[in-house]
Image (tube, rainbow, N blue to C red):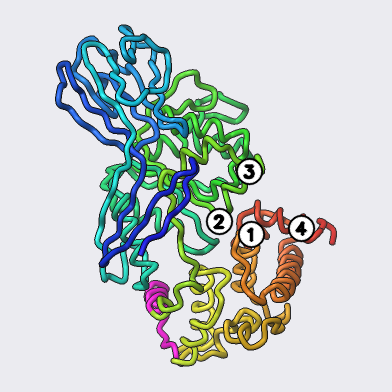
Amino acid sequence: MSSSIPSSDGTEIIVATSQSRLRVQFDAIELRVAAGPDAGLEVSLGLPTVRIGTAPDNDVVLSDRAVSRRHAEICMTPNGLLLRDLNSTNGTFINEVRITEAYIPPAAECKLGYSQLLIRQHVEERKVAVSRQDRLGELVGGSERMRELYGLIRAVAATPTTVHLHGESGSGKELVARTLHTFSGRSGPLMVFDASVADPEMVRNDLFGHIKGAFTGATGAREGAFRHAHTGTLFIDEIGELPLDLQPRLLRVLETREVSPIGSDKSTHVDVRVITATHRDLEAMVKAGTFRADLFYRLSVVPIELPALREIPEDIPLLAQHLCEQLQLKCQISAAAMAALQDYAWPGNVRELRNVLERAAVLCGEREIGPEHLRLPKGMMRASRESDPVAEPAPAAALDRSSARAALDRSSGITAPQPGAADARVHLKGMERQMILDALERNQNNKAAVARDLGIPLSTLKRRLKEYRISDDE
C-alpha cells in the first residue's frame, strides 16, 4: 500500500508501507570531491541550501587552502541546483567558466580552489519499520495512522530537513514538533513561536531580535527566537498567519542561515532546524497571492499530515486514559461514556477531548463518568448524522466554554466538508456568535482578554468578529 503527498515543486514525496515498512523519500544535494586535498569526500544533505568553505560552520568543510572561509553555496530550486559564489578570493567555476551564480548542468564539473566537485540532486530514501508501539515521545495512539506517523517522525527526525506539519486546530502539531526535536539528537533547545500575533513588528522583533536603541523603548538587546534556538529546533506555529511583508525576511534566514537583528547591519550565523505548522491550505494561499511560492517551497521539503481525532476513533480509549492520568483525574469512564466519546465528531480534536474530560470529572466527582457528564452537542454525534443528517444541535445556552472553544478552532481551520453537516455548521456558527457576545460582555469588550478567555489566538477572534459583524458596542 502506498500514497503520495504533492510537494511545492510539482513532484511527489512518496510514503509507502509494505509488510510493516515505511519509506519516505525527499530531495537532497549530493556532493563528491573528485580531486583536491579532500578527494573522496562524499556528503548527502537534505537541505535547501548547502554552504561550502573552510570555516567549521559550513555544511561541507574543505581543507583546500585556495578555498575561502565561506566560498560558495548550492541552492535547491524548482528549476534545478543553483551554484552561487559568495565573493570568494579565487572564484567558483562550472566547466572551467567562472560564475557569480549559475544552474549546474547534468554531469558538470565544478571547481573551487584546487578542488574538483561533482554535484547533483537526488532522491534520498529513509526506511523505518512501522512499530507496534502505541506511543512515541508525547504522542499517544496505536491506530495505523498514528503508527505511520511515528514511522515518518523517526525517518526524518535526525535529518536537518525542514518539516511542515498540516492538521486541524487541536490535532497536536506542537506535540509532533516536540517529538521530532526529541529524536533529532540536536543539542540546543526547542523554541516555539506563534506567528499569529497580530502586530507585524512584534512578530519581526520576536523572530529576529533587536539591538539596544533599535527603536523607542529598546532599552536592551533581544536575541529573538532564531538565535535562542541555535543548535536546536525552531517550531513556527500558524505559519499561514505570517504577514506577507515578513515572508521574504524569513526566506532569507532559511537560505543564508544568518539573522540580522533589527537595528543592526551585522548578521549572526544560526544553526537551526525549522519545523512549521498550520491548519490553513498554503497551496491555496500561494495561488491567491497571500503566501510566497518560494517560501512555501523552502518549508515543504517534507510535509506531514496529522490525522483529525474523528479519523482515529480507535485511539480515543487510550488517549482518554492518558489525558486522565496527565490531568490527575481520579475517575473512571463508563462503557457508555466511552462509546459516546468514540461516536463524537471532535471538531476541536484532542484539545477538546481534554476539556470535555476535565469538565466531566468536575461534574461527577468521584463517581463513574457517564454520557450525561460529557455534555457533548448532539448535532455533532456520528450516529445522529447517520440517522438524521440535519439533526438539531444543542441550543446555544448549553454550549459551555470548552465546546465553544472547539467550535472556534474548527471554524478557523480548513476542513473537508462532512456529508449532511451543512445545516449543523450553520447552527454551530450561531452558537459561536452567541458565545463570543457572552465573552465580550464578561470582559468589557477587551479583545485580548476575550481571546484568552476563549483560548483562541487574537487573530482568530478578530476574523470571527468581522465574519459575524459584531461591533464593539453590540
179 sits to left or right of 200? left
Q: Nearer the viewer, mark 3 or mark 1?
A: 3
Q: CA distance from mark 3 to mark 4?
A: 23 Å
Q: Residue at x 65, y 63 (%)?
A: 411
Q: Residue at x 44, y 87 (%)?
A: 333
**Label 3 is placed on what type of residue?**
Lys
Give, as a single range, the part of the protein colored magenta: 318-334
Q: CA distance from mark 3 to mark 1?
A: 20 Å
Q: CA distance from mark 1 to mark 4?
A: 11 Å
Which numbered tag is attached to residue 287?
Answer: 3
Q: CA distance from mark 2 to mark 4?
A: 18 Å
Question: How busy is the neighbourhood of tag 2: few (under 14 within 10 Å), some, or many (20 plus)?
Answer: many
101 sits to left or right of 113? right
Q: Residue at x 85, y 58 (%)?
A: 473
Pick whichever of labels 3 and 4 is earlier in the sequence.
3
Q: Secondary structure at mark 2?
A: loop
Pick whichever of labels 3 and 1 is earlier in the sequence.
3
Residue 18 drawn above or below residue 201: below
Residue, disc 1: 412
Which numbered tag is attached to residue 279?
Answer: 2
Residue, disc 4: 467
Which numbered tag is attached to residue 404?
Answer: none
**Residue 466 on image: x %, y %:** 77, 55
Q: Secondary structure at mark 4?
A: helix
Pick whichever of labels 2 and 3 is earlier in the sequence.
2
Contact, mark 2 vs mark 4 (Cβ under 8 Å): no
**Residue 96 on image: x %, y %:** 31, 10
Q: Secondary structure at mark 1?
A: helix
Contact, mark 3 vs mark 4 (Cβ under 8 Å): no
Contact, mark 2 vs mark 1 (Cβ under 8 Å): yes
